[in-house]
Image (cartoon, helix red, strand yellow):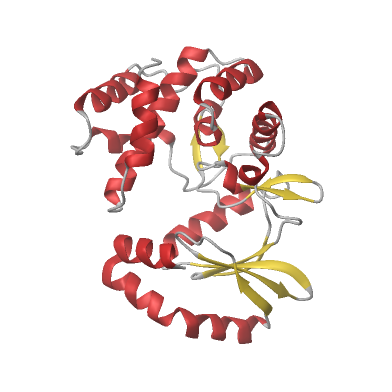
């Protein structure tokens, strides 16, 4: 859990340290309250405490985090995606979620080395399409993708040519034209957020954001050239437009990392490569 401790401390400071100190007691209280059994934390925790457990005789997942608004937003998104390829909420409080557990539960990321590249990218595209069949709630508090992109306008210690290019693409106002219906997007559909279940692949950890579907694709790209080409053909997107928005979201991710006092280096390296394509 070392990475979890580092991330929570860096992002939330003293409040994060307090949450980590109280975590063991919190887990005990929750287990007693909800009669959870066989609670076993998952490896490689990053930003939340997540554990397999038994709840009412069912395989379930317990998820805890110090950021109550963030967990609340995830719960709202999961409810909106209900029946459309996402895990289901079994119980919820401000500081916790108890969710259905995918079975067998391995990630699409883990599958990548075992099957054909095109098969994994196609699976990600299929999960995306299933999620986008969900109706945008008539009344909601989900942000718009444009709200997310405003962070790029701030002054960041990133290469000036990358920021300038991202801002230029955004200012071209090609985010979504009038003929492209906006959808409820997962917002972080990388391959470790796509799990194998008995009835297919399902998504976990949605952020929930409104926007054109093209903004969903960037997170599950692994091979920049081949995957972007496949996605463009699969969804009939102009390849150049897909490449541009892939680059923009890499820069947005760099900004968010800096905001959270984390290193942007992984996204920055990809952004430099993507810059050479556009």
Using residue 153 as the reference point, say whether residue 271 is left or right of it: right
Whether residue 202 is visible, yes or no, is yes
Which residue appears at 33% of the width and 26% of the height? Answer: 272
Q: Residue at x 72, y 56 (%)?
A: 102
Q: Is residue 138 above or below residue 271?
A: below
Q: At x 55% / y 16%, what residue is drawn?
A: 179
Q: How many marks?
A: 0
**Between 133 and 253, the one nearer to me in the picture:** 253
**Quadrant housing residue 227:** top right
Q: Nearer the viewer, residue 127 or 94?
A: 127
User: In this image, 135 relative to 104: left or right?
Assistant: left
Q: Pick the quarter of the image with the C terminus.
A: top left
Q: Quadrant of residue 4?
A: bottom left
Q: Is residue 235 above or below residue 254?
A: above
- In the image, 74 versus 24, the foreground residue is 24
Question: Looking at this rendering, what residue extends furthest in the right direction?
Answer: 199
Q: Position of residue 105 (x, y in %)?
A: 70, 55
Q: Is residue 37 left or right of residue 224?
A: right
The x, y position of residue 114, in whole percent, is: 70, 39
Q: Residue furthest front?
A: 113
Q: Is residue 147 visible?
A: no
- In percent of width and height, residue 57 lies at 79, 75
Residue at left offset 23%, top offset 23%: 161
Does residue 38 sit above or below 41 in this rendering? below
């Amino acid at each position: 859990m070392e990475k979890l401790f580092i991330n929570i401390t860096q992002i939330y400071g003293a409040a994060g340290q307090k949450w980590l100190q109280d975590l063991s007691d919190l887990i005990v209280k929750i287990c007693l309250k909800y009669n959870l059994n066989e609670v076993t934390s998952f490896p490689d925790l990053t930003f939340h405490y997540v554990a397999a457990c038994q709840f009412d005789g069912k395989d379930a997942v317990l998820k805890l985090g110090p950021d109550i608004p963030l967990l609340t937003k995830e719960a709202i998104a999961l409810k909106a995606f209900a029946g459309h390829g996402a895990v289901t909420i079994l119980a919820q409080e401000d500081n916790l979620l108890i969710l259905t557990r995918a079975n067998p539960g391995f990630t699409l990321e883990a599958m990548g080395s075992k099957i054909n590249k095109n098969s994994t990218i196609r699976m990600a595209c299929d999960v995306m399409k299933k999620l986008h069949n969900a109706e945008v709630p008539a009344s909601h508090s989900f942000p718009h993708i444009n709200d997310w992109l405003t962070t790029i306008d701030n002054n960041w210690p990133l290469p000036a040519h990358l920021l300038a290019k991202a801002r230029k693409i955004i200012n071209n106002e090609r985010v979504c034209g009038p003929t492209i219906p906006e959808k409820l997007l997962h917002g972080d559909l990388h391959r470790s957020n796509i799990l194998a279940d008995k009835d297919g692949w399902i998504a976990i950890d949605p952020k929930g954001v409104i926007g054109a579907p093209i903004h969903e694709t960037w997170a599950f790209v692994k091979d920049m050239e081949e995957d972007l080409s496949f996605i463009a053909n699969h969804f009939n997107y102009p390849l150049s437009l897909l490449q541009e928005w892939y680059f923009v979201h890499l820069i947005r991710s760099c900004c968010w990392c800096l905001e959270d006092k984390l290193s942007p280096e992984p996204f920055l390296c990809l952004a430099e490569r993507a810059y050479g394509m556009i």
